[in-house]
């Protein structure tokens, strides 16, 4: 079952922050975050494996709440290069590595 | 590390012909690769899981005789769209699973745009 992402779209000015949420109705083994720019393939951002895990690099970080079956991606002090569509991919313990992707969140950063 | 290539990046073909798309993991071995299809402004839809040395596993609703998958080596999987029709036009993306001690994740190829006339 496809995870639900919110919001569907976000418009920011450079330097502003954003949060993208990903919720599943099923128990999750891991959550993977990707960013896709128009006409290109998705680029891996990070993976969260354990409940309560938080990760980050540069100004992009994420958390995974296993009990609530949801993950959040945090973008701080956004840059123009952050623009794109963000997808979460969820993996269940029984899915043998298969990811089910959310519908995507379109992030647009303006100067 | 973790670079995946796809070839060709663009293909235009006539209805009824077959098209082969290659997916290669360039700097790691991938026992498992995945094939996705993406329509404009939509999410990635998994078509099949390609396992080296064994038959591919197809998702519900995907015709295995139409979308032939071969995973001949640890670095190469191919998707052949047989007897292509205009409704097969789409963006096809492969990913290769990279297993390390710390994590297992998928790295995507650059995608192949197929246009069937």
Image (spheres, coloured by chain):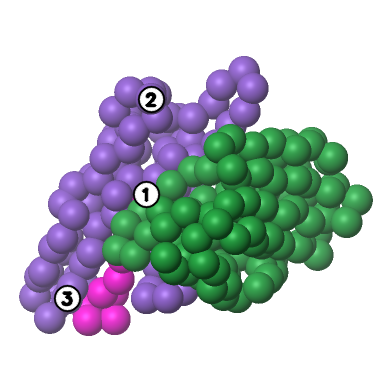
Chain colours: A green, B purple
**Residue lying furthest top in this view?**
B101
Q: Magenta stretch: give its range.
A: B85-94
Residue picked out by circle 1: B94
Q: Which mark is residue B116?
A: 3
Visible residue check, residue B71: yes
Q: Residue at x 64, y 61 (%)?
A: A18
Q: Are marks 3 and 2 on the same chain?
A: yes
Pinpoint the chain carrying mark 2: B
Question: Secondary structure beneath disc 3?
Answer: strand
Q: Is residue A96 above or below residue B100?
A: below
Q: Is residue A91 left or right of residue B49?
A: right
Task: Tell me the chain of label 1.
Answer: B
- Give left or right: position of A89 versus B39: right
As drawn, is A53 to the left or to the right of A17? right
SS label for mark 1: strand
Horizontal and vertical percent position of residue B101: 62, 18
Residue B66, by quadrant, is bottom left
* The label number, if any, that marks residue B1 in the structure image: 2
- Residue B66 can be seen in this image: no
Q: Where in the figure is residue A47, as x and y percent of width and height?
A: 63, 39
Distance from label 1 to label 3 (Cα)? 19 Å
Which residue is at a point 54% across and 69% down the rendered structure image?
A: A12
Q: Position of residue B27 (x, y in %)?
A: 33, 23
Q: Quadrant of the N terminus of chain B?
A: top left
Give the number of the disc on residue B70.
Answer: none
């Amino acid at each position: 079952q496809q995870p639900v992402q919110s919001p569907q779209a976000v418009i920011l000015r450079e330097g502003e922050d954003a949060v993208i949420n990903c919720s599943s109705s099923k128990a999750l083994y891991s959550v993977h975050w990707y960013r896709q720019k128009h006409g290109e393939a998705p680029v891996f951002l990070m993976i969260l494996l354990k409940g309560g895990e938080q990760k980050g690099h540069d100004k992009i970080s994420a958390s995974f709440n296993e009990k609530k079956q949801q993950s959040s991606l945090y973008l701080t002090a956004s840059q123009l290069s952050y623009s794109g569509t963000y997808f979460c991919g969820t993996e269940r313990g029984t899915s043998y590595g298969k990811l089910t992707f959310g519908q995507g969140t379109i992030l647009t950063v303006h100067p | 590390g973790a670079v995946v290539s796809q070839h060709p990046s663009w293909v235009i073909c006539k209805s009824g012909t077959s098209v082969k798309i290659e997916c290669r993991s360039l700097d790691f071995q991938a026992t498992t690769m995945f094939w996705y299809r993406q329509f404009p402004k939509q999410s990635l839809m998994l078509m099949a899981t390609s396992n080296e040395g064994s038959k591919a596993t197809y998702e519900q609703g995907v015709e295995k005789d139409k979308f032939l998958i071969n995973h001949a080596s640890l670095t190469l999987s191919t998707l052949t769209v047989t007897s292509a029709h205009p409704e097969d036009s789409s963006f096809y993306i492969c990913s290769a699973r990279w297993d390390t001690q710390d994590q297992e994740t998928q790295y995507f190829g650059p995608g192949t745009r197929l246009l069937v006339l």
